Image (tube, rainbow, N blue to C red):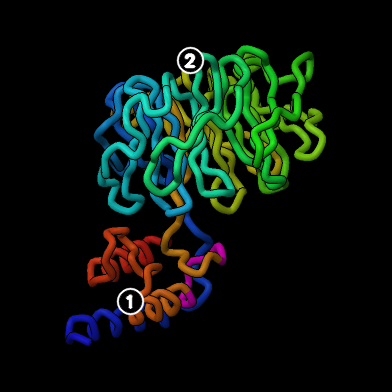
Amino acid sequence: MSQSMCARFAWIAGSALFMGAPTTAVATDLLVADGTSHVIRRYAGDGTPKGVFASGGLEGRTALAFGPDGFLYVSDSQNNTVQKYNPVTGEHLGAFVSAGSGGMVDARGLTFGPDGRLYIANAQTLAKILRYDGSDGSYVGVFAGAPPVPRSPLFGADGNLYVACELCHDVVRFNGQTGATMGRFVDSGTSGPLRPYGMAWGPDGHLYLSSARANETIRRYDGSTGLLIDDFAVSSLILDPISVAFSADGTVLYVAGQTSNNVVAFDGVTGAFLAEVVPSGSAGLGQVWGIAVLPCLADHDGTGFVDTDDFDAFVYDFTDGVESADFDRSGFVDTDDFDAFVRAFEEGC
């Protein structure tokens, strides 16, 4: 081991012993898609701007998702592509799904399935759910016919696919293996989501839907039956909620407003209003299209805390040169990974 690496180990070990364990629960950073500047902006969980996280390859309405490989994937409804970005540096890695592949037109959401493949809600040319290889982005085929104006495809704990229908004001469920329709999971009507856009599974196992035409509300539905539980979160500050995301520990629900061009935070357990964490125009923010919570990569052992156990686990992996120590996702395990881990460790994420 080189002298510089020995010095790195000695410094971080001393710092870790001083701090004790556990240190803090994992921090939450938000990624916000800016449709005016066509960039992905980064904010701390309290709304503190952290600059432009990623740029390149974006032109229109976007949706964000992290893949099983940890990389950030962004669908674009204007150029009909899916772009790929490094989750640590934000480096643009090019088009993961090339323009129009598989007939993709006006993509309105993406998700990765239990099989590791990428699923995209295609809103035009007969609405459908398109499926792509999760490793190279090549087109696999049509997975399922979708409801009119599909939004926010999302797999559930049961392995099935759930798709919001903005036009129908409901959520349709599809068999996660065959793509066969299983009927409406959330029905339209007085208790249905009025113009649903964003969906997220909560830490309680229930389904949370933005309802843009129901008093700017996030509604909660039973994760087993699809029946309405309550209007979980309501605020006049959020206009046309388009995207929802829970913090890493599930204690905060973030909601992005399409018309208000902001992000509002609610208590993830009670639904109580907390704050407008990202106001309209914050750090140059323009049209808001979507949000995502940036995974905490410094939580190396996945316990929900950044502590000395994470340091120990990373050092073991780094010393052995295993793939999980490629912290900056460069394809190599080197000192850059160690330095990147230290920076994230110091920041608590």
Query: What is the number of the mark on residue 72?
Result: none
Residue at (25, 79) in percent of width and height: 8
Residue 149 position in % (x across, y down): 56, 16
- Decide which of 290, 114 is in the foreground and name it: 114
The segment highlighted magenta reads: 303-309
Dot 1 or dot 2, earlier in sequence = 2
Look at 61% across and 48% down and name the residue there. Answer: 251
Tell me the tag on residue 321: 1
* Quadrant housing the N terminus: bottom left
Mark 1 nearby-residue class (10 Å; few <14, some 14–19, many ≥20): some
Q: Position of residue 321 (x, y in %)?
A: 33, 76
Which amino acid type is shown beneath numbered disc 1? Gly
Q: Say if residue 262 shows up in the picture.
A: yes
Q: Which residue is mark 2?
A: 124
Dot 2, crowdedness within 10 Å: few (<14), some or many (≥20)? some
Look at the image and tell me whether residue 281 can be seen.
Answer: no
Q: Quadrant of residue 212?
A: top right
Q: Quadrant of the C terminus?
A: bottom left
Which three-letter amino acid code belongs to the residue tagged 2? Gln
Distance from disc 1 to disc 2, alpha carbons, whole Å, reads 46 Å
